[in-house]
Image (cartoon, rainbow, N blue to C red):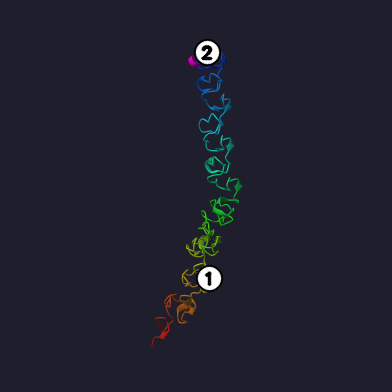
Amino acid sequence: MPPVGWSLFILRGRLWGSNCASPCSHRCASDTCNVINGSCTFCNGSWGEICDKLCSEGCSNKCLQSDGTCLCKDGYWGMQCTEQCSDGCLLDACNQTDGTCAQCRAGRWGILCDRSCISNCKLCNVNDTCITCMDRYWGDTCTSCDNKCADTCDKSTGYCTCISGYYNVNKNESKCKTCYENCHNQACDPESGVCHQGCVDGFWGDYCNIMCNNSCNSTCAQDTGFCKGCSNKSTYGPLCDQQCSLNCLLSECEQISGNCTLGCYLHHYWVCVKTIAV
C-alpha cells in the first residue's frame, strides 16, 4: 500500500515526491506527472522529462516528448523542424530530412534553389541554361523582344507581330523593320511589309518603291504602274508615252483610246488620221 502522502497524486495529480510537496511542471498536460520523479506523463506544446523544452515553431503539430521530433510545417525542415527551407523553394516546400527543394521559384536553380538564373529567366536547369524566359524575352540568354513588337515574341526565334508602321517577313528574324517610306500613312502589313493602304503620289508596287512614269499626272496604279492621268494632254496610253495625233485639235486626246478630245482639224475624223475627201 503506497504511503499516505502519495494518495494526493492519485487524487489530485498535480504534486509529486514522497510528501507530495512538489508541484508538477506547469508544462505537463493536465498538470499531471510521475509521483516518484516528477516527469510529465504528457506534454502540451513542449518536450523533455518535465516538458521544459518548447516544440519548434516549425512543427505542424505536437512534437515527441522524448526528443522533440515532429512533422514540419511548410517552410521548415530537420528532425525538430528548426531549419528554414531556402527562400528559393517553390511554395516554401522542401525535404524534411535534408532541406532540398521539391521545385524552385521562378528565377532560381540548384538543389536548394539558392542560385539565381540569368536575368529575365523564369526557369533554368541545373546547368543554369534557361528553359523558359520571362514574358517579352527569348532565346538561351533571354534577350529582350524588339520594342516594336505588338505583344510578346517567339521564345525560340524572337519573331513577333509588329506594331503599326513596322513589319517582319522572316519568321527567324527578331527585328521589326520600318514600313517603306512611300507607303500611304507609312502603313503596311505587319507580316509581309506590303503597303496595304496604297502609295504616296508618284510611286507604285507592293512596297511603293518604284517611281511612276514621269509622264503620269503624279499618280499611277499601285499594282501595274499605269498612269491615272497624263501630265501632258498630248500623250496617251497606260504609261502616257504615246503621242496624240497631230490632227487632234490642240493635239489633245483621251488617255485610253487616243481619240481626239476636242475633235479634229478640218478634213479629218475619228482619231483625226483619215482625211475626208473634198
| Dot 2 crowding, Cα within 10 Å, few <14, some 14–19, many 20+ | few
Query: Disc 2 versus disc 1: distance between alpha carbons?
Result: 119 Å
Q: Please, what is the dominant secondary structure of the magenta stretch?
A: helix
Magenta-span inclusion, residue 4: yes
Residue shown at 52% from the left, 41% from the top: 91
Going by the numbered disc 2, the residue's amino acid type is Pro
Q: Nearer the viewer, residue 98 or 191?
A: 98
User: Which residue extends farthest top?
Assistant: 4
Q: Which mark is residue 210?
A: 1
Q: Which residues are magenta?
A: 1-11
Q: Nearer the viewer, mark 2 or mark 1?
A: 2
Q: Secondary structure at mark 1?
A: strand
Q: Secondary structure at mark 2?
A: loop
Q: Percent position (x, y) of residue 147?
A: 56, 55
The vertical placement of 151 against 3, above or below, is below
Quarter of the image with the C terminus in it? bottom left
Residue shown at 53% from the left, 71% from the top: 210
Residue shown at 54% from the left, 54% from the top: 131
Q: Quadrant of residue 249?
A: bottom left
Q: Percent position (x, y) of residue 127?
A: 59, 54
Going by the numbered disc 1, the residue's amino acid type is Ile
| Dot 1 crowding, Cα within 10 Å, few <14, some 14–19, many 20+ | some
Residue shown at 52% from the left, 14% from the top: 6
The vertical placement of 188 against 216, above or below, is above
Q: Which residue bears the numbered disc 2? A: 3
Q: Percent position (x, y) of residue 237?
A: 46, 76
2 or 1: tag closer to the N-terminus = 2
Q: Nearer the viewer, residue 99 or 188?
A: 99
